[in-house]
Amino acid sequence: MTDQRKFNYRTLSSDEPDNLFGGAMPKALEAVLITAGALLISVLLVAVFFLSAGHQPVEVFHTIYRGAFGSWFSWQNTLVRAAPLLLTALCTAIPARAGLIVIGGEGAVVLGGLCAAVTGFQFLGAPPLLAMTAMLVSGCIAGGLWIGLSGFLRHYRGVNETISSLLLNYIAIAVLSFLVFGILRDPATLNKPSTHSIGAGNMLGTLGESSVHWGFGFGILFCVLLWFLCKRMTFGYELALVGGNPRAARLAGIPVGRVILVSCLLGGAAAGLAGAIEVVAVHGRANASLAAGYGYAGILVAFLARHNPLAIVPFAILLGGIQASGGLLQRAHDLPDATVAVIQGLIFLVILASEMMYGKLRFPRLMPFRSNTTLKAT
Amino acid sequence: MAETDVGFWGVVIAVLGGAIRVGTPFLFVSLGECLTERSGRINLGLEGNLIMGAMAGYAVSYYSQSPWLGVAVAGGTGLLLGAIHALLCQHPRVNHIAVGIALMIFATGVAFFLGKPFIQPSAPQLPSIGLGGWSDSPVVRAALDINALFFLGLLLVPALHWFLKYARWGLMVRVAGENANAALALGYKVKQIRLLATMFGGMLASIGGAYLSLYYPGSWNEGLSSGQGLMAVALVIFARWNPIYCLWASLLFGGAAALGPSLQSIGISWGYFLFNAAPYVLTLGIMIATSSAKQTLAGMPGEFVK
């Protein structure tokens, strides 16, 4: 389904040497170069967009930098926004390694947050550590089951997982609204209907002296763990095989359905944890703020990282930075909120288009007589 | 007694009218998606087309005081967005579905960016044709006030059906969708066919968006669309890639989407938010019921990315 290349046949073939005298490029270097080039092109396109909208691009970019990474304060803001992106990106990236395009992160965030809030209310008097664990785990379970449903339907009923996960987003938001406006509503919340508070004592703390909450740490931890799983463990190998060629994987004796299901459960658990963290560390209760678009931005992060869990970390921070600069853009240049969406959409388009460059980059020939062709001839 | 009598029929007709009123954008989006998918591509970015069309239609209608010019310009933006999708997807390594999501984010962003100044002012609306003149009841009259664009969509249904089934170009679209290699062997330019099919599909989706801002709900704001463009993909699967079924499916979805508000209007407000999810649950249920892991669906184009 995806065009993700799982094996680099070029480097396997013996007639093209990997050397400085003209030849193929190592896979990692290729990915870094192409992604960097794509980001550069998107910056140019964004500049053109700002110019045509009547803004000085250089000034706007400087504002984005100030808002995202210019000071310790903006760094903290950026990392807080990157925390859910780390986890929602995993929700797309892990199933994508098995060849599925899951875009249901938003729904998993919403339900994960809702379940965490409900659990938190039950554990009001409990010791904080127990309450927090219960809330985070319940968020994981809710999100995992929600995305797992998409994976289950995909494998056992042949339902397209992209569309089912998208529909589940809307259903999750409707369930949240129904419960938050209905039986779970805390009557004290008048303007913005919310569930009951989980209690200030059970909120997740911050990292050291900063205002960055522990959710960022959990995000990094999840990325590293899942990277290890995908790159260093048997399951990751099975995942790659299923993503590369499901029929060959089945013939090789790999339980394709189970691999697909587990990848969806893992991805969903990550996104559900993102929702739980939003509740436990930021809002303290579940309400409409959970559907803030973290799920959709996570899809972009996953594609930027080419579904590599470790590469998600820098791109989540980059995207978190762009989102964090939205407020400053509004104040300094009178640019609407949607600016962030325009930038994200452009980056996404260019990144996808850059996919066509893979396999076309090669080292320049530094010495004319030791080119590929002469080597082939000998 | 007479009042309850009129009330009962009023409710029935109001539901029917609601299905038409809410279903019209579904009709345009699903017809566009149907054509695109028959040519062998999925455009998941129609939600972006819809919102962009709504914004462009509203803005042009506001400036020119001509809603029909607004519809035309909205169609133009749809052509453009469709072209971007088709040109990017021409390369075999580029993922259709991901490009659709990216275009959705991008077009929605651009529409909200450029549309900010148009949230306040009111633009001239599209005319509607009152078919309820025979009745004294205002409920019936309001329900049978049907917008001109719906009739345009109604004409498009048999036209597209005829085009796909009997026209030479329609045959080319079908071959490109059924088997790209066969089309290439016949000397058809598959990329060009898909480009045109995606552009035309995008145009229809944007016209559906113009209906949203220029007739019902009839204003431009950021919460205008409730995912009609995204549901189009599922709707076309439900309609088995057949334009005539697309009409029935759109009306059904329109009715499902109108369920919450109409139940609220007769005093049932208990599950308002759940009834709002009715179209999505309906879509998912239909997809689960009709899909199979073992065999492909009847009417599915061979090149359809599953």
Image (spheres, coloured by chain):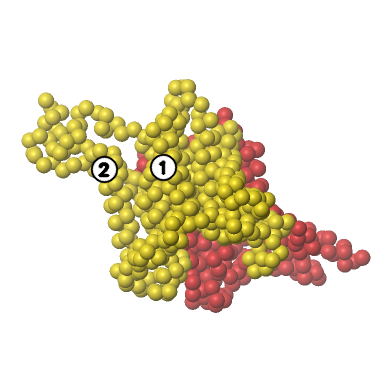
Q: Nearer the viewer, residue B172 or B261?
A: B261
Say which chain is red. Answer: B
Can you tell which mark lies on residue A29?
2
* Res. B272 image quadrant: bottom right
In the image, is residue A55 above or below residue A10?
Answer: below
Is residue B117 shown to the viewer in this render? yes
Q: Are marks 1 and 2 in contact (CB under 8 Å)?
A: no
Which residue lies most toward the front here? A127
Q: Nearer the viewer, residue A132 or B291?
A: A132
Please name the amino acid that badge 2 sits on. Leu
Q: Position of residue B82 (x, y in %)?
A: 44, 54
Badge 1 crowding class, 10 Å Cα cut-off, few under 14, some 14 to 19, many 20 or more, is some
Which chain is indicated by disc 1?
A: A
The residue located at (29%, 31%) in the rendering is A9
Query: Which percent across, then down, holds residue B245?
Result: 63, 46
Judging by the rendered image, the residue that carries numbered circle 1 is: A224
Residue drawn where x is 48% and y is 61% of the image: B108
In this rendering, is residue B47 above or below A30?
A: below
User: For numbered disc 2, what is the local secondary structure?
Assistant: helix
Query: Which quadrant, please, contains the N terminus of chain A?
Result: top left
Where does residue A235 sit, x and y in percent of width and height? 45, 31
Residue A68, compared with residue B82, is above or below; it is below
| N-terminal label among 1 and 2 | 2
B113 horizontally vs B223: left or right: left
Chain letter corresponding to the colour yellow: A
Residue A147 appears in view = no
Q: Residue B81 falls in which quadrant of the image? A: bottom left
On the picture, is B132 further left or further right than B114?
A: right
